[in-house]
Image (cartoon, coloured by chain):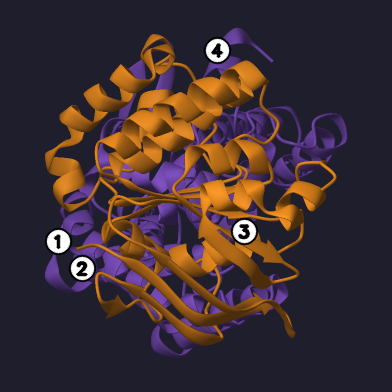
Chain colours: A orange, B purple
Amino acid sequence: MTRLTLERVSAGYGKADVVRDIDLVIESGQRVALIGSNGAGKSTVVKTINGLVATRRGRVLWDGGELGRMRVSDRTRAGIGTVPEGRLLFPECTVTENLVAASTFGKAREHRDEGLARVFGLFPRLAERARQRVGTLSGGEQQMVAIGRALMTRPRLLVLDEPSIGLAPRVVAEIFEILGTLTRSGLSLLLVEQNVQLSLRSVDYAYLLQQGEVVLQGPSGELLDSPLVRAAYLGMTV
Amino acid sequence: MSATIFLQALLSGLTNGAIYALIAVGLTLVFGVMRVVNFAHGEFLMLAMYGGYLAWAHLGVDPVIAVALVVPVLLALGVGLFESLIRPAMKVPEINQMAVTLGLSLLLQYLALMAFKADNLLIVQDRSTASVWIGPVLLQMPHAIAAGAAAVLLLGLYLIMRKTDFGLIMRAVSQSHDGAALSGIDIGRTYRWAMGIGVGTLGVAGPLMASVLYVNPHIGTLFTLKAFVIVIVGGMGSFGGVLLGALLVGVAESVAGVLTTASVAAAVPFALLILVMLVRPEGLLPVGGGARA
């Protein structure tokens, strides 16, 4: 069973710890959200998982093995796909080139055509713009490319960092519908979002992060009803 | 200036420009992919020229054939440079990286001075004085061979960059290091190959240039400067920019040489650099407007 576990993970930048003693588990096929306000440390947690930020204390385990100092590219190859905040696409390359660039290794390369067909099937708009430079696409279309690129790596866990940020509600709805399709096929999901209501309605389990620490966790339905979440994030009085 | 003299200067400038492009393309590849400025680029050209000269002088190997011997050596030197100096230097501020490659440039010059003395050496063959007529203008055979090889290599590099996974990986890393790593691309391996190829291309230029120009331990400095001018005029990291910049510099030098004196012609590339920086600071074909190396 593929499982991601964070055990008492602390990480940060410079001398300061941004997140402290984070415990988090994502079971195979589970949909998990990490919610919290801007600056709570959500993106730092994502970066400790994909390796862009080193873990200072604690352990990140994947498939039972500790990731330790494993490089970013090796974590991707091991099945952790990331859709990063800001997308980090290759703006001068075409849509197809962005997707192909994420299938230059192992099984991803062997199954490249199948991967392209799958991504273009999920996002028909990208198929229409296959030869267009990514830098010329709309924000929503770029987000689709970023998700498609992560899917090309054949992930077993898809980590999305703020996928709805800056996008029109119609596009966000479209993207979340596709994420629903993906998770129904067995893909594990870690969704990091400021849009708390949308996140909690899309996942099974959630963690609430405040000032770098997990202050609440539980099934998403329970968090939706939590007075703390309702008051602080959903603008509702208890 | 008559039309024939102008055409002669133009042809000479274009052939020189093709050779300059061959030299500068490695510099722009390394900068584009790694964001490292290699001040020792010209010294590796100097080593390649010595390689070609020694193969001819001691083994009787034709410079065209010597390319096949010198390229693997230069490629290995590029990889060795990355592993020994650049990889550690990439963990420290950029100014330290510059100091490392600048120091290496001087070190290589003085090592060459110890090994080869300050003599000017040139490959002289039967074909050294041969020429071909192209319409009303004359092209010296060694220049024609060097420019032809440059054109073939540049076309090959362009096709590799555009049509292969290897080229796509290079372009991806040049546009987003983190994005490439998250795509499963091994960044360290890509850097190693970028430096290997960036220096390895000089293995083509060196032996052929040793039949055109005298080689001495300090010849590299001139070409480092010229390559920088070309890369900046064309647009840092831009493959198309290198071609345009190199041809412009080559033609401007050559035409200025006919209209004025040799010393004025030598200053023309730097005047062109200042002009372009004032009018179009991003370069003539910046990344995004042309194919990136």
At horizontal 57% and vertical 66% (from top left) the residue drawn is A45
Spatial CA distance of label 2 from label 1 is 5 Å
Residue under mark 2: which chain is it in? B
Q: Estimate the x, y position of residue B79 in percent, counting from the top left.
A: 34, 71
Badge 4 vs badge 1, beta-carbon distance below 8 Å? no
B115 in relation to B26, above or below: below
Q: Estimate the x, y position of residue A131 in percent, counting from the top left.
A: 40, 16
Spatial CA distance of label 1 from label 3 is 60 Å
Of circles 4 and 3, the one toward us is 3
Ranked by sequence position, the earlier of labels 2 and 1 is 2
Which residue in the structure is indicated by mark 3? Answer: A43
Which residue in the structure is indicated by mark 4? Answer: B4
Quarter holding residue A195? top right
Which residue in the structure is indicated by mark 2? Answer: B55
A215 in relation to B286, above or below: below
Q: Is residue B215 visible?
A: no
Q: Amino acid at mark 4?
A: Thr
Q: Is residue B241 visible?
A: yes
